[in-house]
Amino acid sequence: MGAVREITYREAVREAMCEEMRRDENVFLMGEDIGAYGGGFGVSLGMLQEFGPERVRETPISETAFVGAGVGAAITGMRPIIDLMFSDFMAVCYDQIINQAAKMHFMFAGKISVPMVIRGAAGGGTGAAAQHSQSLEQMYCHVPGLKVVVPSTPYDAKGLLKAAIRDDNPVVFLEQKKLYNVKGPVPDEEYLIPLGKADVKREGTDVTLITYGRMVPYCLSVAEKLVKEEIRVEVLDLRSLSPLDKPAIIESVKKTGRAVVVHEAVEFAGFGGEIVSVIMDSDAFCQLKAPVKRVGGRFCPVPFNANLEKEAFPTEERIEAAVREIL
């Protein structure tokens, strides 16, 4: 067993990219400001010096152009990692992702693959306002052919990104920006986390909080608070939304008999509805002691004002209130 260090989420993402680029010369990084500037969030600092401008490729401010170039590179044998900076910018190149990358393997009868990772900083909490604070993961989960990953810890971020880079399918890899400075244990030795496997971050018997990304620490904080009242909350971190670990959801809800689904994205038509459907369509339904609750973002553009922005997203108070309601 190798040494375990405490590093940030940002450093874990960088390590994953660097290790895979050293391992496979077909892996390269492309995007805006990723070279000398080190990326919009400092994730790629130092990579230009190690790998050079051929493998850390600066792009014009044209997401349609460089995501399209990434699709072309992927189908001809390369493994591009595309840094979109803010995940909101996927709206600019939606056609390249949805109609090209996601469908080519199917439309060419499996004769070509599209092994590419599209990274983007998602979510709010930084005062970046309506066009730079969205959580759009549900839009990508709806598209057959795309995999969607939202890690919550440095350990998960590194292991999942390495697995995503080696995957032969296009993977949308969302890094919620408020997590970049969060530290956690990460082994020195190589490891991968398979896509599609959820993780129980805390065991419990009374209610399951089903969540992912930035809401994981919120849910863990609520669980820690409630244990003082002998309320034992299980926290299930989905990590991967597509493919989705349905057995893990069903098993946890069967054990506790109660569930609250929590995500930062807008609650209306959000991914939480799919999770509720998984529970209701399974034998976990017969074990429910209360209706399944959802706690998600408000149905509004994300405000710039700090106080309003806070209220646009789930808070620990709202999560706790939902847990108490079904208890």
Image (cartoon, rainbow, N blue to C red):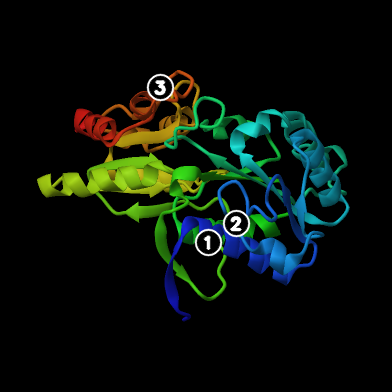
226 vs 68, left or right, is: left
- Which residue is at the front of the view, 38 or 218? 38
Tell me the tag on residue 96: none
Q: What residue is disc 2 on? A: 161
Position of residue 291 relative to residue 110, above or below, is above
Give the amino acid at mark 3: Arg
**Residue, disc 3:** 298
Kind of residue at badge 2: Leu
178 up-or-down from 301: above or below: below
Q: Quadrant of residue 127?
A: top left
The x and y percentages for residue 241 are 54, 42
Rounded to the nearest angstrom, the CA distance separating label 1 from label 3 is: 31 Å
Q: Nearer the viewer, residue 101 or 13?
A: 13
Q: Which sits earlier in the primary sequence, circle 2 or circle 1?
A: 1
| SS for dot 2 | helix
Outermost residue to the front: 36
Asked if the residue under mark 1 is in contact with the one under mark 2, i.e. CB atoms within 8 Å, the reply is: yes
The residue wearing badge 1 is 12
Mark-to-mark CA distance, 2 and 1: 9 Å
Label 1 close to label 3 by CB (< 8 Å): no
Q: Amino acid at mark 1?
A: Ala
Which residue of the protein is positioned furthest toward the top in this rendering? Answer: 300
Q: CA distance from mark 3 to mark 2?
A: 30 Å
Residue 138 in sight from this viewpoint: yes
